Structures are given as structure tokens and as C-alpha cells.
């Protein structure tokens, strides 16, 4: 294919990706060093109240934004260096907490609390998703042919459901004296409030995420199981391998590329955990990195959005993704150069 | 079972364990969704009752005068069963008979819409009317036993004008699917047929883009979108639009965010179409574009439909981008539901939120029913080739 034809085919897609992915990255990078504020002026305001003989007048200094010719608030954009990052990371409080070995104080800084939850969430769900997915795939592979279709149908439901609604549906089972909370209370014989402390909310979030992603892992493993080499399995049996040995030394190595694939996709997706925070309304107890940026972008009571801090926290989130991707990119680089030269 | 080798035969305990685990998984997978479905039809007292039987049978709802009798349930289930059966057997035959050659897709769309309308009229208008006449005559059979009310759906769809959000969701989703497939198909084909280094690096960069959290990108759009009228004024004059709150701007954003995934997936589908096919067309004197139009396009639909499903899911399920880039007046369904549970002051509001959630889930449910095979093949294609 000539370069010109190739460019014509790929052009529109590249243009879109450039305009809406690459360009915003640059603008976020620049924006993270800038601060946009309304231009304020100090005005002397005299307020008088009628009194006996003379009026009592007081003058106060009032700060108010200057309006431009369209009647909108004028803003200035200044280059502020690392200020936005300082405001997000709060190095003083961080340093004080670290030097005192005070974990709770460190968790008072939103960014570190978000980072802790995001990393914990990513690392805990990863093995669970792979394990549960593999278990379902093995069980379905073992089941009678006639029930496979309906089981796949039911299994796909948690996967395609809107994430916010999936999280809500779990939340509604537990909220207040919901049926599962009261079942737990009857079983453990104590009063339980699932939404009163961070760790119970985190448990529900972990459960939700595994419930949501395990079907994806299941479908992929199930497809992989169909191509396991039967001859290898038979020779393993002849060699006296037990069921467990066959799973461990034949099936799992065969599925290894798929396990890596799922782990990769899962790391990318879980690192941007966000919908759980919205669905469980957990921002008072648990927040994630993406939610932090989202929160800065939401207009506050005065209608201002903290673009500068949002950009700074977005850039810090990016740093995490880069760390995540470096091993992958290095491997691809090596494979490509090893393969083509 | 007798023809399986003895060593492959499984002990009873293993088979029972495996079946039990599957049953347990299916229960867990379906239960939350099933349960919000049940809750949405009950009065608030029943919906959030701590006894599961109360939620299912809804005594408070029944006492409120809304309920189903045994007769209602039997006839309703029979109606459902036969309408699904007809949809499976009679409908495809009619479509095949009556649609002119090559117009199968249009035929299916018309048939599906017609059937859906007929079903809604039959199930929600004619059936309740007939049963309303029958129930008082039959005495004990006609007494309500299960509480069920549709008042929350009425509140959501009629009073709170959820259909506005539905229309917005529809616009955004249809826009995203069409544009993303048009652009993505071309790019996927180009990438699949070019073995150059450039193609390889485009794919790798797309993979990196795939990993970016969406909030990072939205942090880049938002300042520009809010001020776009001023930024664009020198170029476009007074016609410069404010991109914030525009559905088509959101469509462009979602299409771009989805491009990396789309081109990866379509590329792997196009690689499965043998190269000889377009080479033959090229030998006969077609240009690349003609080969694509006349040789590849007729055979690419399975892959395109599968990729389209995933674009649909992304656009339909999105919360972050739509909630930040659209304003109240043209909000889509998923962010709109956040309004319900943030203000949930009364339990009625909560049950209305449940009803809205079920309304959002219902189309997805239908989607899995119809396209289960395509979804599975799409998931596996990405994994095995990518």
C-alpha cells in the first residue's frame, strides 16, 4: 500500500486522536502551571442608615470581580509555576506526616488518600478477577452443552451493565436496612451500618468490581480453553498427571498469553476507578485519583472550576499510567526490534 | 458418557462441586439486577423492607390497591412466552418473505420496531383492560396476591421528563456509533493492510492512548470548551459556538476516546479477511478505495457490528465525559440518574431512582439477548489477536 493511500485511510482517525487526545494532553500540561482567576477590584462602599439628627455612615472595602463589556467576569491567566502541584500535593503536611510516621495525617491529604485507594483497588482486584474468571471458565467448560448458552447470557449481564448502575444496584442491596444488611445482622448478631466507615464501603467496591469484570475474563478464558491441545492433555494423563497437575502444567501455561492480556487491560481500567465512587456516594470516606480530578472540574458554589488544580492532579495521574506502561512498552520495543531486524 | 476415556471421567464430587459453583455464580451475577427490577415495582415501604419476602410479595403495595392476581400472572407469563416464541420463529420468516433482496437490514429494523410497538400495546394496554374485566368475575382467582405498581415509572418518565434524557442518550449513542465506525473502519483496514513501521507505531501509540484516564482528557477539554466562543471568534466571527453543552461536541470527544480500541479491534477483524481478496480486485484494475468498497465492504459486517456494539456500550454507559461536558438542559440518562440519588430525601425518590436505573438497564438487557454471540466473539477477537 502506498503511503498516500495509507494516509487517506488512516487520516481521519489520526486527526481525531490528535485533536481530542494528543492536543488536550499538551493543554493539560500547560494548564497545570497556570492559574486562572477572576480579576478582583477593591471598592470603597459607603452604606448609610438613617439615624437621629445625622445619618450613620460606614465605609467598607468590598472585593468584587470586574465585568467586561459582555457583562461576564473578567479573568486573568497567570503563570504560577508549581503552585497548582503544591496545592494538590500539600508537601508541608505530607512531609510533617512522613517525618512523624503518621499514616492518618498522610491520609488527610486528598491526593495520597486517592492514590492509596487506587493502588490497593488495582492490586487486590487483579488476582481475584483472574481467579474467578478462570474458575467460571473451567466450570462452564465442564457443564452440559445445553446450559452453556443461558449461563453465558447470565454471566454477560454484570459485564454490560452501566458501571454507575451496577454499583448502585449493589448499594441498594445494603443501604439502610436493605435485605443483605439485615441478613448479615441476623447472622452476626450485631448492628451493622455498611456506609458508615471506609473499609466496608471498600469491600463492597471490591465485590462490585470483581462482579463486573470477572465475566470478561471468563469469556476470554473460555475461548482459550477450547483450543487446549487434547494430545498434550492425553499424554499428561498417560504420564500419570493428576487433574490438578494437568491444570497447572498444561492448561494454565496455554492460557498464559490471555492471562497477561487480561491483567494488562484490567490494570488500565482499574487504575481509572471512578464510577464506584459515584455509585456508592463514598467521597466522604474513599476517593480515587480520577475522582479527584473530576471533583476539581466540577463547578463550586460560586460556579468556578479549579482548572489549574485539576490539570495538576491529571498530570500526576498520568505519571502513574506511565509507570504502569513502561514495562509493556519496553517489551513491545524489544519484540519489534528483535522481530524485524 | 461411556465413550469418554476412564481417566477423563470425573468423580461425582468434582462434578457436583463444579455445578454448584456455576449455580452460585449465576445467582450472584443475576441477583442484583433481578432485585432492582423487583424493587422498582413496589411501594417504597416494600422496596426497602428488610425481609426479602416482603420485597417480592409487596404487602404494602397490595394494600395500596395495586396488585396482580393469580390469573394476571398466569396470563401475563403466557403472553410473554408466546411473544418471545413468535419473535424467534414467525418473525424471521416474515422478514425473509417480505423484504426485497438486499434490503434485509431495513426489513429487520421495520419488523423489530413494528413488533415492539405491537407488544407494548398488547401487554400494557389491551391485556390490563381484558384482565380488569375478568378479575372481578372470577372471585378468589381474581384477588391480588402480589403487590405491583408502575407509579414510579410513571413518575420518572412522565413527571420528571426522563424521555428528554432518553432522547439525548439516543442522539449521543447513535452519533458515536456511526461516526466511530465510519472513521474506524477506514483506519482499521488501512492498518491491517499496511505492514509498515508507521502502522506499527500508530497502533502502539493508540494503545498508550487507550490507557489514559478520561478525566485527564476532560481536564484538557473543559477550559477550551467553556471559552470556545471567545477562542474561535477571530476565525468564525459571531457564529463561533460554545462547545460546552453541545451534544455533537460530546460525540466528537467520545468517538476520539473510543478510536484506539475501535481501530485495534477492526484491524484484527480485517486481518482475518484474506489478503488475496483485495489483491484479486486490484489485479482487475480497482484502486484501493474501489477494492475496499466493492470487495471488502460486503464481507466486513460481522466485525463492524461487533465493534459497533462496544462503541454503543461506551457511549451509552459513559458518566464522566457526559456529566462534565453537557449541561442540565441536554443531559444524558446516566448522569441524570445521579441527580436522583444525590437528592434522595424521601424513600419515594430512592425508588424512583431504582425505576430510572431499571429503565436504563432494559435496553442493555435486550442487547445481550439479541447480540450475545457477537459480544462474545468481539471479546475473544480482541484477546486472541491483540
Image: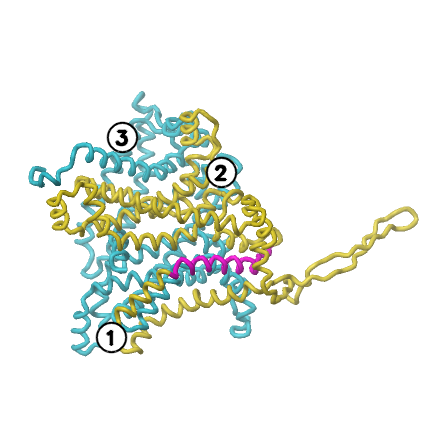
Q: CA distance from mark 3 to mark 1?
A: 60 Å
Q: If the image is split into quadrants, where does the N terminus of chain B sit?
A: top left
Disc 3, SS: helix
x then y, percent, for residue A182: 43, 28
> Mark 1 packing: few (<14 Cα in 10 Å), some, or many (20+)?
some
- What chain does badge 2 belong to? B
Return the mark for residue B16: none
x then y, percent, for residue B179: 36, 63
Range of residues picked out in magenta: A303-326
Q: What residue do we see at 7% from left, 37% from top? A: B2
- What chain does badge 3 belong to? B
Chain coloured yellow here: A
Magenta: main secondary structure: helix
Chain coloured cyan here: B
Q: What residue do we see at 55% from left, 43% from top? A: A104
x then y, percent, for residue A295: 53, 52
Residue, disc 1: B288
**Horizontal side, residue B114 vs residue A295: left or right:** left
> Mark 3 packing: few (<14 Cα in 10 Å), some, or many (20+)?
few
Report the front residue among B356 and B137.
B356
The reply to whether callout 3 and callout 1 are in contact (CB within 8 Å) is: no
Location of residue B259 with respect to A193 vertically, above or below: below
Q: CA distance from mark 2 to mark 3?
A: 31 Å
Residue, disc 3: B74
Report the front residue among A227 and B164.
A227
- What chain does badge 1 belong to? B
Residue B182 is at least partly visible in this image: no
Residue, disc 2: B349
Mark before the other along the chain sequence, 2 or 1: 1
Mark before the other along the chain sequence, 3 or 1: 3
Location of residue A328 with respect to B35 vertically, above or below: below
Assess whether residue A312 is covered by the magenta stretch: yes
Amino acid at each position: 500500500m502506498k503511503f498516500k493511500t495509507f494516509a487517506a485511510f488512516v487520516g481521519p482517525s489520526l486527526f481525531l486522536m490528535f485533536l481530542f487526545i494528543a492536543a488536550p494532553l499538551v493543554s493539560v500540561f500547560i494548564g497545570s502551571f497556570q492559574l486562572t482567576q477572576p480579576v478582583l477590584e477593591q471598592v470603597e462602599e459607603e452604606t448609610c442608615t438613617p439615624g437621629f439628627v445625622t445619618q450613620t455612615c460606614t465605609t467598607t472595602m468590598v472585593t468584587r470581580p470586574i465585568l467586561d463589556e459582555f457583562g461576564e467576569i473578567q479573568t486573568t491567566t497567570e503563570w504560577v509555576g508549581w503552585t497548582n502541584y503544591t496545592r494538590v500535593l500539600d508537601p508541608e503536611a505530607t512531609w510533617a506526616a512522613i517525618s512523624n510516621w503518621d499514616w492518618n495525617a498522610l491520609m488527610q491529604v486528598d491526593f495520597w488518600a486517592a492514590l492509596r485507594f487506587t493502588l490497593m483497588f488495582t492490586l487486590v482486584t487483579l488476582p481475584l478477577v483472574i481467579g474467578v474468571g478462570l474458575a467460571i471458565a473451567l466450570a462452564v467448560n465442564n457443564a452440559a452443552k445445553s446450559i452453556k448458552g443461558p449461563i453465558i447470557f447470565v454471566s454477560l449481564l454484570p459485564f454490560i451493565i452501566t458501571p454507575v448502575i451496577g454499583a448502585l444496584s449493589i448499594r441498594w442491596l445494603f443501604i439502610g436496612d436493605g435485605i443483605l444488611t439485615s441478613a448479615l445482622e441476623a447472622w452476626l448478631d450485631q448492628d451493622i451500618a455498611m456506609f458508615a466507615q471506609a473499609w466496608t464501603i471498600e469491600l463492597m467496591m471490591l465485590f462490585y468490581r470483581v462482579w463486573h469484570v470477572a465475566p470478561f475474563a471468563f469469556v476470554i478464558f473460555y475461548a482459550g480453553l477450547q483450543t487446549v491441545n487434547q494430545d498434550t492433555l492425553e499424554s499428561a494423563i498417560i504420564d500419570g498427571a493428576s487433574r490438578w497437575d494437568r491444570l497447572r502444567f498444561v492448561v494454565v501455561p496455554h492460557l498464559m498469553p490471555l492471562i497477561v492480556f487480561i491483567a494488562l487491560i484490567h490494570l488500565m481500567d482499574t487504575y481509572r476507578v471512578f464510577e464506584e465512587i459515584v455509585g456508592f456516594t463514598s467521597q466522604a470516606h474513599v476517593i480515587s485519583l480520577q475522582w479527584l480530578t473530576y471533583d476539581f472540574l466540577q463547578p463550586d458554589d460560586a460556579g468556578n472550576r479549579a482548572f489549574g488544580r485539576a490539570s495538576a492532579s491529571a498530570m500526576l495521574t498520568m505519571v502513574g499510567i506511565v509507570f504502569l506502561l513502561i514495562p509493556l512498552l519496553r517489551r513491545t520495543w524489544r519484540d519489534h526490534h528483535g522481530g524485524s531486524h | 458418557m461411556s465413550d469418554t476415556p476412564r481417566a477423563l471421567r470425573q468423580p461425582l464430587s468434582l462434578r457436583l462441586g463444579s455445578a454448584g459453583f456455576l449455580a452460585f455464580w449465576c445467582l450472584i451475577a443475576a441477583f442484583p439486577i433481578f432485585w432492582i427490577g423487583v424493587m422498582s415495582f413496589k411501594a417504597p415501604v416494600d422496596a426497602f423492607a428488610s425481609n426479602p419476602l416482603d420485597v417480592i410479595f409487596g404487602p404494602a403495595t397490595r394494600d395500596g390497591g395495586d396488585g396482580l392476581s393469580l390469573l394476571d400472572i398466569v396470563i401475563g407469563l403466557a403472553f410473554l412466552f408466546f411473544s418471545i416464541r413468535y419473535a424467534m420463529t414467525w418473525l424471521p420468516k416474515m422478514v425473509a418473505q417480505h423484504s426485497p433482496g438486499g434490503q434485509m437490514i431495513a426489513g429487520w429494523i421495520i419488523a423489530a420496531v413494528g413488533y415492539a410497538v405491537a407488544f407494548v400495546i398488547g401487554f400494557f394496554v389491551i391485556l390490563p383492560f381484558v384482565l380488569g374485566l375478568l378479575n372481578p368475575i372470577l372471585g378468589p382467582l381474581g384477588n391480588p396476591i402480589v403487590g405491583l405498581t408502575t407509579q414510579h415509572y410513571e413518575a420518572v418518565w412522565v413527571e420528571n421528563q426522563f424521555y428528554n434524557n432518553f432522547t439525548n442518550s439516543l442522539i449521543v449513542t447513535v452519533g458515536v456509533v456511526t461516526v466511530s465506525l465510519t472513521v474506524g473502519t477506514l483506519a482499521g483496514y488501512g492498518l491491517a493492510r499496511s505492514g509498515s513501521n508507521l502502522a506499527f507505531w500508530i497502533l502502539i501509540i493508540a494503545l498508550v492512548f487507550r490507557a489514559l484516564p478520561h478525566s485527564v482528557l476532560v481536564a484538557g477539554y473543559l477550559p477550551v470548551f467553556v471559552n470556545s466562543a471567545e477562542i474561535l471568534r477571530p476565525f468564525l466571527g459571531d457564529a463561533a459556538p460554545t462547545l460546552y453543552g453541545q451534544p455533537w461536541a460530546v460525540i466528537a470527544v467520545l468517538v476520539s476516546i473510543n478510536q484506539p480500541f475501535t481501530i485495534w479491534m477492526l484491524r484484527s477483524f480485517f486481518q482475518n479477511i484474506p489478503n488475496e481478496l483485495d489483491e484479486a480486485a486490484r489485479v482487475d484494475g480497482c484502486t484501493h478505495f474501489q477494492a475496499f468498497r466493492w470487495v471488502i465492504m460486503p464481507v466486513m459486517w460481522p466485525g463492524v457490528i461487533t465493534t459497533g456494539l462496544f462503541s454503543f456500550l461506551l457511549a451509552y454507559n459513559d458518566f464522566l465525559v457526559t456529566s462534565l461536558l453537557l449541561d442540565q438542559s441536554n443531559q444524558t440518562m446516566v448522569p441524570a440518574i445521579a441527580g436522583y440519588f444525590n437528592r434522595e430525601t424521601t424513600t419515594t425518590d430512592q425508588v424512583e431512582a431504582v425505576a430510572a436505573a431499571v429503565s436504563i438497564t432494559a435496553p442493555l438487557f435486550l442487547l445481550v439477548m439479541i447480540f450475545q454471540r457477537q459480544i462474545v466473539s468481539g471479546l475473544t477477537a480482541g484477546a486472541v489477536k491483540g
